[in-house]
Amino acid sequence: MNWLPLITEQQLMDIDLLSQNDDIKAIFILKHSTRCSISISALGRLERSWKLSEKEVPTYFLDLLNYRGVSNAIAEHYGISHESPQVLVIKKGKCIYVATHSDIFSADIEEAINAEIR
């Protein structure tokens, strides 16, 4: 996976705009804690099984320990509760999928990305 660092709140606006692009299926965000064994395990599972193109699905990585303010902004902006690890799928400026902890699997994320917005 080619992780793009998510380090500023402004990037959330950029992500929303990018997710409107017809060449982009969705945006994927991973909120990760480098001190949490569950988070490290989820990251490993994702990196071993991820099959989607980074051109169609840009992948953003948020280091929670260094950018907690950005994590709080994500929770407020998309109307979700903060958890770690946590993945979000952004499509057309909306969070259409969230998973946390041991519920993070590439197949589920891919299914959400390929589903139509309801």
Image (cartoon, rainbow, N blue to C red):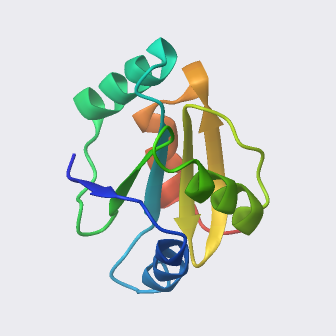
* Vertical comparison of 98 with 100: above or below: below
Outermost residue toward the top in this view: 37
Q: Nearer the viewer, residue 115 or 89?
A: 89
Q: Nearer the viewer, residue 56 or 71?
A: 71
Residue 92: where, in percent of width, then height? 57, 78
Residue at coordinates 46% horizontally, 81% vertically from top-left? 14
Residue 100: where, in percent of width, then height? 62, 31
Residue 108: where, in percent of width, then height? 51, 38
Residue at coordinates 33% horizontally, 82% vertically from top-left? 23
Q: Quadrant of the C terminus?
A: bottom right
Residue at coordinates 58% horizontally, 48% vertically from top-left? 68
Q: Quadrant of the N terminus?
A: top left
Q: How many marks?
A: 0
* Vertical comparison of 13 with 28: above or below: below
Q: Nearer the viewer, residue 53 or 28?
A: 28
Q: Position of 2 compared to 92: left or right?
A: left
Instruction: Kindly indicate the quadrant of the structure image that contains residue 47.
Output: top left
